[in-house]
Image: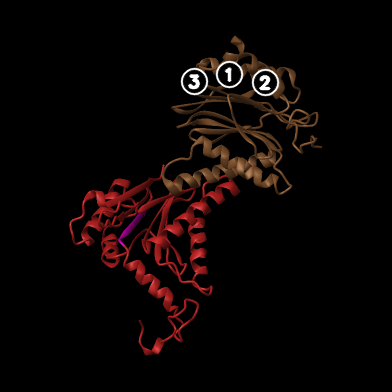
Amino acid sequence: MLGPQSMGYDRTSIMYSPEGRLIQVEYARESVRRGSIAVGIKSKNGVVLAGLLRVVDLNEPDAKVHKIDEKVYATFAGVAADGRVLISRARLEAQIFRMTYDLPTDIKGLSTKIGDYCQLYTQQGGVRPFGVGLLIGGVDDTGSSLYYVDPGGGVISVKAKAIGEGDTEAISILKEKYKEDLTIEEMEELAKDVIKKIVKDEVEEKDIMVVSIPLE
Amino acid sequence: MNMMNNYGQQNPFENPMKGTTTVALRFKDGVVVATDRRASAGTFVASKRAKKLHQLNDYTVATIAGLVADAQYLVNLTKANLNLYELNRGYPPTTKMAGNLLASILYEQFRSYMPFYVAMLVCGLDKYGPHVYNLDASGAIIDEDYASTGSGSLFSYGVLEAFWKEGLTEDEAIKLGLRALSTSISRDTATGNGMDALVVNKDGIRWLTEEEIKKILEEL
């Protein structure tokens, strides 16, 4: 909760604070940072998405990277229920694109559609913003594409990105190791290394889900 | 002009879905499906390479007859829904589900007084066995041993009626399917310009090549 200066301006997402901030959206970004880590890397050879599976008790692990279309995948960090809704939405948009144009969707267009959808929840009344950050990656006619969609609806093209718990440290490792011509295998290794380094406890190989989409 | 009988039902043989013949039949471990390639507008041949046989997913196909726009839209809509089903669950829908999904779409439209003007076959192989679903514009769906739609269907039904039997092999079924369709190509003016044909078995969908079809027809 914020101090006296901003008191009351964090009660609804559609209300600006006097400094021009949307404080509910900033809180939503905090809930992304509490999610388990997800990593995306792209190079001229394709895209790799990876994430840490957090399994509690005797629950069966859910997937961390989700298929959206033939060559499009997405991973998210944050509120699982909100993520599920956005994943369903992305699949629906991909199929609508196929029905309309008889072609697989472009990833920029799809990411923008999901961004538009998130943005509505920062302007409409009676709703809260999505508590997830979404990495959408894959290959299309333009080559390798990787986009980050944030809870406010921002859509950013990224070379590599980490979201979730430990993202700051993960991004600094990615910055250090990233090259434009990484192979798919190198990107897979890098993604796994990043996750292993920021998770302090022992991680087993099976706790990391990796999906690669090579550019043919 | 749609003729309705006293029960308000369409008689498909008084006014068949125009200018097409499609044929599908069940055999021991799968189905054979064949369609012609002519699109007609009255006595005019509107296309010599119309695609009337569509893959819905790895084990399910559909044939179309009737209004081309309606049929193509329905194929796209069904495909999109089947893809969403598989993406959301991680396993594919069965042929039975594909057929019944399309039937519900047709029924809903029929009861909104603006039916899709189509006759379609949804065929494939799933865990319940091989299926040949015959769907009409009202949303009726019947799982048949064999079926035919379009203006030439009566000719093809004659051949299927005479030669189809339980327990056909794949080769026998292919021959019978092509024979039934080639009869319509010979005797129906709105059917012709070659054929598309495929087999669905446990390995998935196999399209017959131009040469294969030619060879089988010569041997008939």
Kindly tell me whether residue A157 is visible in this rendering. no
- Residue identifier under label 3: B28
Amino acid found under the numbered disc labelled 1: Ile
Q: Residue at x 21, y 51 (%)?
A: A204
Any idea which chain is the red one in this picture? A
Which portion, as a residue range, is magenta?
A36-42
Instruction: Give percent across and percent down for residue B146.
Output: 60, 24
Instruction: Give percent across and percent down for residue B163.
Output: 61, 14
Residue A181's disc number: none
Q: Nearer the viewer, mark 3 or mark 1?
A: 3
Q: Residue at x 74, y 26 (%)?
A: B190
Do badges 1 and 2 share one subunit?
Answer: yes
Asked whether the beta carbons under mark 3 and mark 1 sit within 8 Å of each other, the answer is no
Using the image as rendered, state which of residue A4 and residue B153 is in the foreground: B153
- Residue identifier under label 1: B213
Using the image as rendered, state which of residue B94 and residue B211 is in the foreground: B94
Amino acid found under the numbered disc labelled 2: Tyr
* Label 1 to label 2: alpha-carbon separation: 20 Å
Instruction: Give percent across and percent down for residue B108.
Output: 65, 47
Q: Residue at x 62, y 42 (%)?
A: B74
Provide the chain ID for the residue under circle 1.
Answer: B
Colour convention of the picture: by chain
